[in-house]
Amino acid sequence: MTRINLSRRSVLLAGAGAAAALRAPAVLGQAKAKSKYAGTTIRGAGFSMPFPQYLKNYFPEFEAATGIKVEFDIQAFPVYNQRMDLELSTGGSAYDVAVLTFIYQDRWIGAGWVSPLDEFIKDPNATPPDWDPGDFVAQTSMRDAKGQTCGFGIEAGAVLFWAARADLLDKAGLELPATFDDIVKVCEAVNGKDGVAAWVQDNIHHWNWPPYLMGFGGTVFKDPPENLTPTLDTPQAIEAAQFYADLLRKYAPPAVLSYTQDQALEAQLKGRGNLRSSSATWALPLAKSPDSTVKHTVRYGVFPTGPKGWFPGNAMTGICIPAGSRQKGAAWEFIKWALSKEMLSRIVKDHGYPSVCRRSVIQSEPFKQAMTLNGQDVAALYLKTLERAGEAGYMRYRTAAVFPQVGDKINRAIEAIATQQMSASTAMKQAQLQAIQAVRLGGYKVDL
Amino acid sequence: MSLVLRFAAPRAAAAASQARQRRRFLTWCLAPSLAVLFVITLAPMVYLVVVSFTPLNLTNPATAWRFDQPLLNYRLLLSDERFLNSLWVQAKLSFWTVGLQLAIGVGFALLLNLRSGLLRALRTVFLVPMVLPPIVVAIIWKVLYTPDISPVYWTFKALGLSLPALITDPNWALPAIIAADTWEWFPLTMLMVLAALQTVPEELADAARVDGANSWQTTAHVLLPYIRGTLMVAGLFRLIDSIKAFPLIYLLTDGGPGSVTEVTNYYAFEQAFNFSYLGFSSAITVVLVAATLLLSWVVVHMTGWGAAE
């Protein structure tokens, strides 16, 4: 279960510490490593997300400080997951560091495919006390059954809601939607205005849709992680699927169903799509990217509330050392460097990275400054969302070992509804049957 | 008579013994090649069949040798609507791609077989799609099919026309894959047919013309029957390749929207590589291999290919 314990008071208390960390040299604590691992080459891999892209800019510093050469592949999300899943399952040694995709955490950690990091964390020679592993938020999903830490978070994906062209909402006399009903009202009012589609979304529906599902009172599984019986054919699930598919069908640009996260971002950067709900990571470039045409019209809010409550999505993507790695020591040096307070603070400062997982950095004043966009305190929205997900524990479905399989059925069903191949009821009943089969094939009991 | 028999019997026995020794010698000579052939081709197939009787799941290595419900995967397949749909999608994809590639390939081959310097120069150009890496072909078509960046869509828009989003429209997604696959592979059939056409003796066509046949009749009654064997081989190659269709589907539609373009091969890939259900995926693959063999056999026998002329 993902638990995040943050309070606004602690934001202020920790601010000074993190601000000081910003000034600290980036290579702190690396001097010993240079003599031990110099000449080693480590290979890493991840999917296309901002953190590894930003981090790459600092690799020369790490290499100069430690003598460890880093080769890091970045692939598209589905390609990376398939390749890494295969690589880890065969105990391959091709990679020494890997991004721990949120939907694969339980599967990869549970199967023993990634190395426990405790031997490094607990060894003062390998990890200085001020590195502070306890400073990471939502670490629960990164632990194995024995409670050993198998990874550290690099991206806390808190779902926000935003309008790239809020000026169109203003012209229509409407606010950023606060409820699901408001979303429809706003879409009806602004769709096609100024040539802008009211809605845009990427095609990872198994990430985007569950907050709507839960908002309508539905769930993905009966009671994860103990009871993984799928519940995709309930009236609530059918209603949520119809609602979400209608947004895609009625208000989104043509071919939206083929949009990757990058394409959805691009559509907003170029002002072709207006409203979107997704991780904060995809929201901030609209205000910060030099390519953005909507810098002055973007407006951010929290995810809207459904008829049955407020369930903004939250997921922690991490970094780990594959069990088959032959350079675990050097890999740990890399992780230690990449996730040090100093490095994360620099990435926040230099790139405005919004999805940091270190509490002390999240609570720092520089983070708040970096997240103040168009005069809006996006840091506060981010914290509010993280706190909500941490308290309520409704994100447990996402780390179930069979979620990737069930997520695939959700994706197919949403596409079938959005393209009117099937009614929501038929598509979700079919998804339920297929999900049951997938859960059973995974070796889990289904309680029907 | 008995004298003849007395000498003939040992001679026959000696001949039989010699034949046996010869067979044994040849068997030993072939043995290394057969062993290599077995290890390289048959052993993986045998393993595939064995795995299809297990619930092998990579996250649980203990499932590798569990045979308590050997037919479970096959039973699941029978009631798996997505699998059954994938067979139907596969049939449609194969029918259209093979048919179109043969028709277009033959058409272009007949044109290129004409005595023209320009057409000879164009031969190489027509081969380009076939020699491009499949991933490049997929990227080209992805660009063409994506409304935001496609010059085709821009052109239509400039003309005041609108095109549906081909790869996300359930009515157009499969035709879009068929078009891209046909573009990529019609040069192969064209090349094979062109090579065959160049072996047709000129006297045959000349004789037909002397008998009063026009160009269409000469083509239909002389050239095409003459190259029937080549057409059969080309069709069979393309049929088998169409069953292996992957990069275009993976990059253009991911099997969607919904499962509109999800062929059996792609479904097996998803089960194995996205979800690690190797046992289930192996069962799908076994069915696919069996269907391919059966289909090839039916095609070969229906058309009488390989029979004595």
Image (spheres, coloured by chain):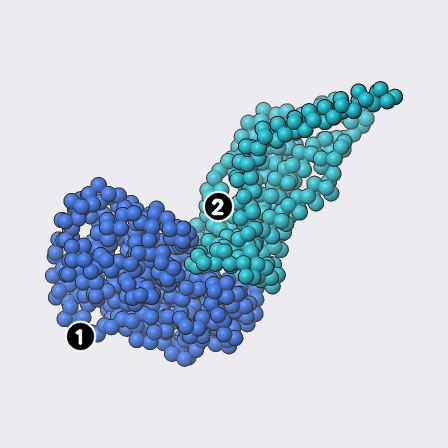
Could you say whether the residue bearing mark 2 is in a helix, strand or loop?
Answer: helix
**Marked residue chain, label 1:** A
Q: Which residue in the protein does label 1 denote? A: A9
Q: Are marks 2 and 1 in contact (CB under 8 Å)?
A: no
Q: How far apart in space, not on screen, are marks 2 and 1 (Cα)? A: 53 Å
Rendered location of residue A429, percent (x, y): 55, 70
Tell which tag, 2 or 1, sits nearer the viewer.
Answer: 1
Residue positioned 26% across, 53% down in the render: A54
Which quadrant holds residue A225?
Answer: bottom left
Rendered location of residue A347, percent (x, y): 22, 56
Residue B15: mark in rendering: none
The quarter of the rendered structure image containing the N terminus of chain A is bottom left
Residue positioned 29% across, 47% down in the render: A326
Residue B228 vertical placement versus A122 (above, below): above
Q: Which shade is chain B?
A: cyan
The amino acid sitting under disc 1 is: Arg
Residue positioned 63% across, 49% down in the render: B291
For residue A223, side relative to residue B171 (left or right): left
Residue B200 vertical placement versus A244 (above, below): above
For residue A132, side relative to residue A231 (left or right): left
The amino acid sitting under disc 2 is: Ala
Residue B54 in sight from this viewpoint: yes
Residue positioned 21% across, 63% down in the render: A133
Q: Residues within 10 Å of mark 2 (few under 14, many from 20)?
A: many
Q: Which shade is chain A?
A: blue
Could you say whether the residue bearing mark 1 is in a helix, strand or loop?
Answer: helix
Residue B211 vertical placement versus A370 (above, below): above
Rendered location of residue A278, percent (x, y): 36, 65
Q: Which residue in the protein does label 2 denote? A: B138
Which quadrant holds residue B28?
Answer: top right
